[in-house]
Amino acid sequence: MGTHVIKMPDIGEGIAEVELSVWHVKVGDLVVEDQVLADVMTDKAMVDIPSPVHGKVISLGGEPGEVMAVGSILISIEVEGAGNTKDVPVVAEPAKAAPPVAEAKPVQAPVESKPAAAVKAPQAPVAREASERPLASPAVRKHALDAGIQLRLVQGTGPAGRILHEDLEAYLRQGTATGATAANPYAERNDEHQIPVIGMRRKIAQRMQDATRRAAHFSYVEEIDVTALDELRVHLNEKHGATRGKLTLLPFIVRAMVVALRDFPQINARYDDEAQVITRLGAVHVGVATQSDVGLMVPVVRHAEARSLWGTAEEIARLANAARTGKASRDELSGSTITLTSLGALGGIVSTPVLNLPEVAIVGVNRIVERPMVIKGQIVVRKMMNLSSSFDHRVVDGMDAAQFIQAIRGLLEQPASLFLE
Amino acid sequence: MTQTLHTTLLIIGGGPGGYVAAIRAGQLGIPTILVEGQALGGTCLNIGCIPSKALIHVAEQFQQTVHHSQGSQLGIEVDVPTLDIRKSVEWKDGIVDRLTTGVAALLKKHKVQVIHGWAKVIDGKTVEVGEQRIQCEHLLLATGSTSVNLPMLPIGGPIISSTEALAPTHVPKRLIVVGGGYIGLELGIAYRKLGADVSVVEAQAHILPAYDAELTLPVAESLKKLGVKLYLEHSVTGFADGKLQVRAPNGDILALDTDQVLVAVGRKPNTQGWNLEALNLDMNGVAIKIDSRCQTSMRNVYAIGDLSGEPMLAHRAMAQGEMVAELISGKAREFNPAAIPAVCFTDPELVVVGKTPDEAKAAGLDCIVSSFPFAANGRAMTLESKAGFVRVVARRDNHLIVGWQAVGAGVSELSTAFGLSLEMGARLEDVAGTIHAHPTLGEAVQEAALRALGHALHL
């Protein structure tokens, strides 16, 4: 028997610290080669750490949320044969007779200390096949029935995946915290649930805070008549939807941004406020804000200026799906020059988007509604949509911003002009 | 017509399913009426489980004494015994009386109103017993099952069912049992031990056709030793003049001389004679179709036990009855056991809990199958019963035990350990790591698990 130690890998780009997001194993688990041990996070990419060996986990090197140095010990696994421990300090007593002490701490001190009670990563619901019988004793089964829980969804930590009373309690605590109980909806509630701000959420919080602290946000809202645009969209979908895929409004707006930016290079730019340099870019890499299970992500449609309408639509759909399922790569999540944000039907009438620094502009799409409009003295029903955009007023003047949005408006209201060269 | 009675729960049938449901309902404060046409305790207490075990005990004791009178190696010397079967039956009736009286007392204690009479269903909330009309919110059907009859062997005179066989006035000189399932063999072996010449006619190629050949082999050997003649793959064609006519596999018709014929070809749900048709319930073959909460296709009408089909076992009915009472009281319940043990009180006894190797295979499980023979168990030797073994079936990947089988003297009591291990989700290591008392038959359980892990100690 030997100990195989896995160190926090260098994920690239000279990053010295990596945040440990979640453990997929615990002390005492048997792991097989290629089994995912943990997720770690850098910038906005989540990276799986697979096991290179078969063996038994004897210690974990950190708690979820901990920021660990590259090269520090991530996990120690007891393996058949010699292991790879020659060059590292001994972690636990090598005597094999005693079972490994639960939670044997590695020598390296945690980077930050945490209140003891607070953070245990919430249990992810486990989906079993409908036909697969969850393993649990009769008492646990009865308790689950009483509590109205489907055992199928509860993670079992006992031998052979057996669901223990403790597992059920943990699941129940989680369930009540999300508030799905309420036999009496008017009952006074005093429950609290602490959710550690780690991983994605911490990243998002930092970036939002940073953006609002540093940039001088200036928002501008304009109303756009999209009746003609929507007619064109519907027409194209009828004609080509079956073969080229359905178009939403987003690729048209991306196209309008690409065309308008030709005249407003100061808006397709990055502002490095420390070096005091603005970089204007020819390429239009449009970040598309996307909601995923773990939070906001901004995958990037690269070189939107070189894409057709359908090419853009396809890329948006692909990236959104990749982001939602956590498959988006680091490259796909960085490098944008301007951002587009849309909540679709939830778009509301006005929003005040937060800049995705170091960009200097973000275009927000509000909901389309039919409104009575006065055109040439007549009241007519038109499809109206607001664009709510924010600019970094430090480097974008109000006049430029307004003209940029007016240009977009002109393009969208006369959709043929989107494609005139 | 007398005044209509009103109740929350009305149970038709006072067998193990119905009376347990009534007791539990009483405990939970549900106003309950139980209607029983014959005797509380149903088939199980009156003409099934209990009386058959009493008769089997008498037969075993008698046969042991005969065995000693013929020169026992234990050194016991007795004269050739005689048997007063009427006294045996009286003793058995005494036990049945005590138990059924006990059931009545328990029902009374839990404030269950028992109405004696035959129920007639009017609709899903109304039942009549004679002139008495009863209205209920929940109707629980627990009418049990009846013996299957063969058209060419109508019960009467020398042709008897298990009911008559359990209350003999004399032991026949020759008895032919039609049916080689557990009821036929339990009674056939008992009658053989009581002194009758017993033959068993079975249409299939094996006795106890529900179980695999390895498991039934010790029973087959015991039958041979006891002198029970087997007519396998023979089918009955008729009975006349004290001769049972059977067709051999080659087509020949044999006429077998006999004094009595016991028909034991199975049981069927008791759906006739109480106007069940009025409810027009969905059926599952001849049984009432139920879901995992024993609910029928009609709201607030439940069916439990043999009436709801296989496995027709009293302990299943009891568990279902208890559950239905709890459901009616508003608890969330589901009938979802890991296993329902099945026991044959043959000689040797046979017990099956969970999946057999064949069933595990059919379920797509890769399993370790391992057995430990009683021939290597000290306690079995001291009981003069070395036949049989304990067998365990466990998943190869995580050693989770999915089934236990055993055959041997007294193994019915091992069903407790087997059931507990399956319900608790034990792995081979759990059973192997549990100290089993020495010297007991149960050591074979631990050794079977050890052997599956590759290190049996006494083999």
Image (spheres, rainbow, N blue to C red):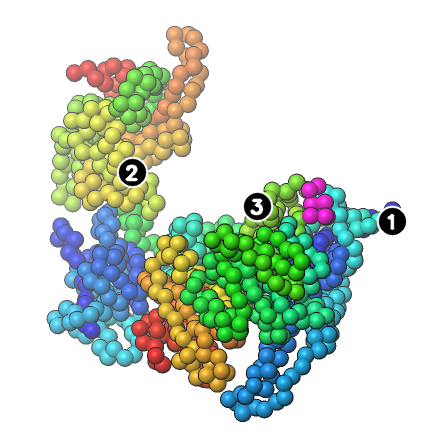
Q: Is residue B19 visible?
A: no
Q: Nearer the viewer, mark 1 or mark 2?
A: 1
Asked where in the image residue A2 lies, by quadrant, the reply is bottom left
Q: Is residue A305 left or right of residue B126?
A: left
Q: Residue at x 71, y 53 (%)?
A: B12
Residue type (three-letter) at the residue carrying disc 1 = Thr
| Front one among A117 and B320 | B320
Q: Nearer the viewer, mark 3 or mark 2?
A: 3
Percent position (x, y) of residue A388? 33, 29
Q: Are marks 1 and 2 on the same chain?
A: no
| Front one among B314 and B252 | B252
| Front one among A221 and B43 | B43
Q: Which mark is residue A321?
A: 2
Residue A235 to residue B412: above or below:
above
Q: Residues within 10 Å of mark 1 (few under 14, many from 20)?
A: few
Residue type (three-letter) at the residue carrying disc 2 = Asn
Label 2 marks a residue whose chain is A
Q: Is residue B87 visible?
A: yes
**Residue ID for mark 1:** B2
> Magenta region: which residues?
B272-278
